[in-house]
Each structure stands twice: as C-alpha cells, then as structure tokens.
Image (cartoon, grey):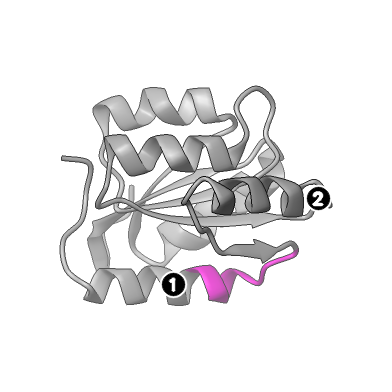
Amino acid sequence: MKMGPHPELKVLIVDDENVVADSLALVFSTSGYDTRVAYSAEQAADIIGNWEPKLVILDVVLPGMNGIDFAIQLETKCPRCRVLLFSGQQVTSTLVQEAVEKGHPFKVLAKPVHPTLFLDEAARLASAGPASCA
C-alpha cells in the first residue's frame, strides 16, 4: 500500500485476468490509492470481510459468481460502496438486462478501458465523501 493523495480511498479490483487486475492495481497504487486485488467474486467477498473498499472495480464475467450478481450482493452488504463494472464479453448485455429487470441498473464500461477513466471515477468518488461497508 502506497500512501499518497487518496490513501482514504480503498479500491478493490476484481478480474479473473490476472494481468488486467494486477495492472490496474499498479495504476491505482502508484497514484496513491490503497488497493487490493481479487481474481474471483468469492475471493473479493473474503477480502471485503476484513477490509472495506470505497470502490470496487469489477469484471462482469468471472468464474463462479458473475460480477453483476456480486454487485447486487454488495448493494446489500455494503450499500455505500461504489461499484464500477467492466467487461469485454457479449454475454454481459444479457446479464445487465436481467439485473435491470430486477431493479439493479448498472453501468458497464466496455473493455478495453483506459486506466485514466478508472482513475477519474475514483477521484470523483473520493470527492463525494465517505463511503464504506457499514
């Protein structure tokens, strides 16, 4: 963890593509964020049990539980934790539509996403005030 301009903003990055998750973690940590990485929704749930992120950057297509189902779970367990979904898979549109029909409208960024878009969103959230799992 590198302390910098945003050490209060904890960011959890969840992607089963290790290189994507690790690269985003590097971008965030070198920008001064407290960053953790998970390679599945289940691993992310374990991390959140002990560490409360303000932002979860979450791939939609994951092994086991998909990112949208995990995001819905986060809405209940961590209502003030923000979620930013991203995906490069076609199946995402079906999953997003099903979530919308159940009352969970999510914005999904299409891969590849430039890291500055994630950093911009994190900065916006940091200025929005405190949020965490509570």
**Residue 113, numbered circle:** none
Magenta-drawn segment: 112-118
Q: Residues within 10 Å of mark 1 (few under 14, many from 20)?
A: few
Q: State the separation of the CA atoms marked 1 and 2.
A: 22 Å
Work out whether residue 5 can be spotted: no
Q: Percent from the top left, x then y, of residue 42?
A: 51, 23
- Secondary structure category for the residue under label 1: helix
How far across and down, in percent of the image, does residue 26 sit?
52, 55
Q: Quadrant of residue 110?
A: bottom right
- Tag nearer the camera, 1 or 2: 2
Q: Quadrant of the C terminus?
A: top left
Is residue 41 located in the magenta-colored stretch of the structure? Answer: no
Please indicate whether residue 91 sits to the left or right of residue 23 in the image: right
What amino acid type is highlighted by mark number 1? Glu
Residue topped by disc 1: 121
Q: Which mark is residue 89?
A: 2
Residue at x 64% of width, y 52% of height: 96
